[in-house]
Image (cartoon, grey):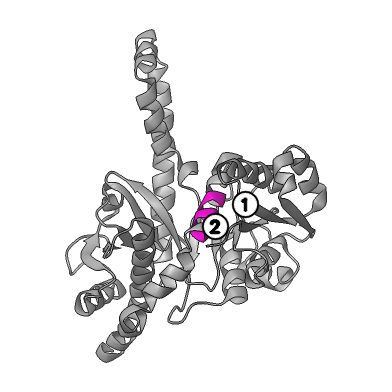
Amino acid sequence: MPQKVRIALDAMGGDVGASVVIPGAAISLTRHPGTEFLLFGDRASIDPELEKHPALKKVSRVIHTDVAVGMDDKPSQALRRGRKTSSMWLAIDAVRKGEADVAVSAGNTGALMAMARFCLRTLPGIDRPAIAAVWPTARGDSIVLDLGATIGGDAHHLVALAVMGSAMASVLFEKERPTVGLLNIGVEEIKGHEEIREAAELLRTLNLPQLEYVGFVEGDGIGKGAADVIVSEGFSGNIALKAAEGTARQMSELLRVALSRTWLTRIGYLLARSAFKELRDKLDPNKSNGGVLLGLKGVVVKSHGGVSAEGFAYAVDVGYETVHYDLLTKINRMLNRDGGALAQAQTAQEAVS
């Protein structure tokens, strides 16, 4: 476990760049004083923001580049134009070189995934990385993946997601054998695409010691905490994430309007203010910000592009804690335990193909 966590930030990433990234890093620094930062981006934008945060400036080094990956750039365009020169690439490359322990970016998701995969490479047995995040539920927290790193995937890919997610859950939740469910349109075995049904059969047949497969989970089961790990291919996972975030914002707004409607509701709010604050915090998507790109030979965290400084700070916190608790090493150890779960899954799929 490193004494200091070194975090590389893509200061040009996101909808507004440094004006959110820098104050967000400053907020995270107050929670994790043992942090050093490498800030990649345009000095003309970074330096004025740093002057507002002296404590952050003392533990930061700015590496100038005026090349930024656009939020609308295609991954191929980002690789072609921004490889070795963009703030996103340089932040990821700092991890590859050992200059930083983790890279955090609020930039273009597709570009970030493409650059991270190209620069860091994937772990043995992993074809494609995934975005995994902690999802608050009625029973506590769950790990949900993939939240949009890639679209589609065969049964082996879904099993790989299950193994990586369970490894992450075992570390974060301290569970020897986390429960795993596959996100589907119904709980019956005949429901869903062929790839999902085949992945379910593989997980039942393998009966891996790393996880306990509990079957299909419908969309409402995520919030109920139906399993410690919910697995989906990236298209469905990203829709589920955005739908949940939109619902949370809608609920918060409806609650605000209802509580300010009459003087009686205002009095009721004052009497139950602490309870309403707790509810508002649980509904705040900013406080669940930060997805870990699992399956890489390095740690990269994806923040939403349109979050506030407070929201970005939570993504930086995720990066800090991922390194502080040595999540990458522990996940790699879990993946290779008992002969390698992914190798077993690949052999099993080939046998039935």
Which residue does the image show at 39% across and 63% down from the upper left?
168
Find out whether residue 224 is within the magenta segment.
Answer: no
Kind of residue at disc 1:
Thr
- Is 320 one of the magenta-colored residues? yes
Is 204 rendered above or below residue 19? below
User: What label does residue 302 carry, if any?
Assistant: 2
Q: Position of residue 86 (x, y in %)?
A: 73, 64
User: Mostly what secondary structure, the magenta segment?
Assistant: helix
| Residues in magenta, as a range | 316-323
Q: Earlier in the sequence, mark 1 or mark 2?
A: 1
> Residue 216 sits in which quadrant?
bottom left
Name the residue furthest top: 263
Q: Quadrant of residue 61?
A: bottom right
SS at mark 1? strand
- Picture layout, residue 106 above or below residue 128: above
- The location of residue 269, given as percent across then percent down, is 37, 17
- Residue at horizontal 30%, vertical 52%? 222
